[in-house]
Amino acid sequence: MDNNEDATEKKWSMKDFNYPVPEHAKQFGYAVGGVTFVGFILLIITGIVMTFFFTATVDKARDSVLALSSSPWGLWLRSFHRWLAETVIFLIILHMTRIIFTGSYRGSRKTNWFFGVALLVIALAFLFTGTVVKWDQEGYEAYLHAVEQVDLLPVIGAPIAAFLKATSIVMTMFVTHTLVLPLLFLLFLIPHLVLMKLNGLSPLPGKKVKKEIKLSKHIGKIFGWSFVIYGLLSFLAMQYPAELFPGPYTGIEMTKPPWILLILYQFEDWFGIKYLSVFPLLMIIGLILIPYIDSKKGDYSITRKIVVWTYIIIMALFITFIIHVAISTPVQHLG
Amino acid sequence: MDKSNYKQCSNLQRRFYTLKNTFFALIICLFFSPLVIMAQGGDEPKEKVEKVTEKMLEKDQPQSDSLRQKQDFAEISKAVGKGTVPTVIKALSLAAFIAGFAILYLPKKKKEVSNG
């Protein structure tokens, strides 16, 4: 019997997929990526259900969301989807923080880091389009900010802005939110997961893997944490429903963006709307450069310290901005 | 990181892990801080903004649909939030929350090795 026949006659069982992984896979820091993935699946499920109740036109969008919110399950569904979206962004940042702290972007993991950065950008685009699509005052203000930014882009800005102004904006955002972005997300998520499997779980800094556990135990931890986080979130969604603002009305600015975009709000306060897109662009460039800045081997090299401390300082500043903007009164930026 | 391994680490590694854990804890606390602000009446600025909006609406848009809409949602969410179904949803959510902790922390029964 040759090898080929051997392969065809092999009977696969679930045990073959339960391969060993390093023991530290049990830690929350190493399960947070999986918890984020579960959150994304929940977002897809809740999003698909909401699609059946949504009317993607400028005059009916807000009313359809209001109608959905008129039943307890509808109110919970919408609030859960909204809080889930913001939590997934938070979990992505936690996942990124763990990767930076453990230097898991070096060597063969560099490509996967770039896929991760792309996924973060797409997740933020999801948050933005999801905010606009309900077409209340919050969505309208977010849309105006985006159009202003796009208009300022050299060469491509004017035609994109013209396209946005010419199309039915709610339908454009709805198609982007439910079709374009999910496809893009999958396009980057699949290689992200494949590379993670090929590279294996990143090691703990300064330690060699001694013990191993079964993959099922790692997945068990992911589900455990998912139940804890999303169970609590589900409770909070019913207790504190996501707000639906009035309007939209022109000439007033009364809302603040979702928590992660409060950082941009602070920069808008300081430098004005013209330079709003410069900051996220710098952040993306900074994230892309990290594996090039810290490429040396060794867990406690000087470049590692520079990257980790720079990250801590920037994150501390962002947290300060978020708190400051969250407790301050909204101001007029447009017009 | 396991406590047993913690003792074997160098001071630098210990500092690194303490820093990492503190940072994670800080981020988690800050994420939930808006709830504390809300509970302590931190939504006052929102009230002010609504008043500004009311004034602008009365001035510019006599139909004042938006104000009614605003009340609509506030009233609807308040009315919908009471009743049996929301209580059931909250109970199921808390059950999932507790089940998660059970999955994470309840000791697993070790498989007994049979000697044939």
Image: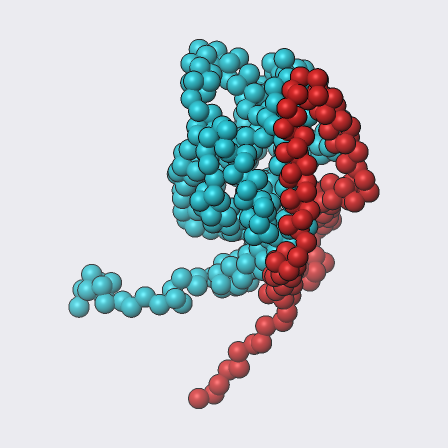
B34 or B82: nearer the viewer: B82
Residue A261 in view in this figure: no
Give the position of the C terminus of chain A as an image quadrant. Answer: top right
As rendered, which of B29 and A20 lies closer to the eye?
Answer: B29
Q: Residue at x 35, y 68 (%)?
A: A13
Relative to A164, say whether A36 is above or below.
below
Which residue is at the front of the view, A210 or A116?
A116
Residue drawn 58% across the image and 30% down it: A136
Number of numbered discs visible in the structure rendering:
0
> In which quadrant of the rendered image does the N terminus of chain A lie?
bottom left
Q: Residue at x 81, y 40 (%)?
A: B41
Residue occupying the far left of the picture = A1
As displayed, is residue A90 above or below residue A9? above
Residue extending farthest right: B40
Instruction: Give chain B's shade.
Output: red
Quadrant in the rendering for residue A266: top right
Q: Nearer the viewer, residue A166 or A66?
A: A66
In the picture as drawn, the residue positioned furthest to the front comes out as B63
The x, y position of residue B53, in whole percent, is: 71, 24
Residue B86's x, y, as percent? 63, 56
Q: Position of residue A298 (x, y in %)?
A: 58, 41
Whether residue B56 appears in this view of the structure is yes
Q: Residue at x 68, y 25 (%)?
A: A254
Q: Report which quarter residue B27 is drawn in.
A: top right
Indicate the chain coloured cyan by its letter: A
In the rendered image, residue A180, in percent from the top left (x then y), is placed at 41, 34
